[in-house]
Amino acid sequence: GPGYVDTPMQQGRIDDACHRELAGMHLLKRFAEADEIAALVVWLLSDDASFATGSHYPIDGGYTTI
């Protein structure tokens, strides 16, 4: 469950003030980088996650905790 992610597709769709406001809604005060989301996907696809089943993994920089 990713939150807001800085991607080329997202950039330019919102102005800087909106970007700062949305980033401020995260505990980490920033958007995720695509590599951070990819790292979770890689882990989920690895043998290290072989016992992880039927779960939701929020990777949203604390957005859903506020």
Image (cartoon, helix red, strand yellow):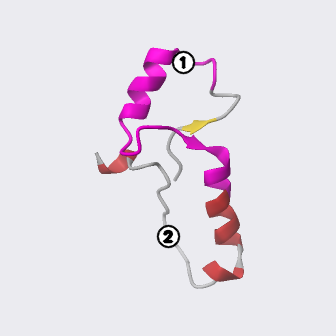
Residue picked out by circle 2: 55
Residue 4 is tagged as none
Front one among 64 and 16: 16
Amino acid type of the residue that numbered disc 1 sits on in the rendered structure: Ile
Residue at 65% x, 70% y: name it.
Answer: 43
Q: Residue at x 38, y 50 (%)?
A: 62
Query: Can you tell which quarter of the image residue 26 is in?
Result: top left
- Residue pictured at 62% horizontal, 78% vertical: 49
Q: Amino acid at mark 2?
A: Ser
In terms of depth relative to the viewer, which is nearer, 12 or 50? 12
| Residue 32 is a magenta residue | yes
Query: Disc 1 designates what residue?
Result: 14
Rendered view: 35 above or below 56: above
Residue at image x 31%, y 51%?
65
- Residue 35 position within the rendered picture, expressed as x and y whole percent measured from the top left: 67, 50
Front-most of residues 28 and 50: 28
What range is drawn magenta here? 11-38
Name above or below for residue 31 compared with residue 42: above
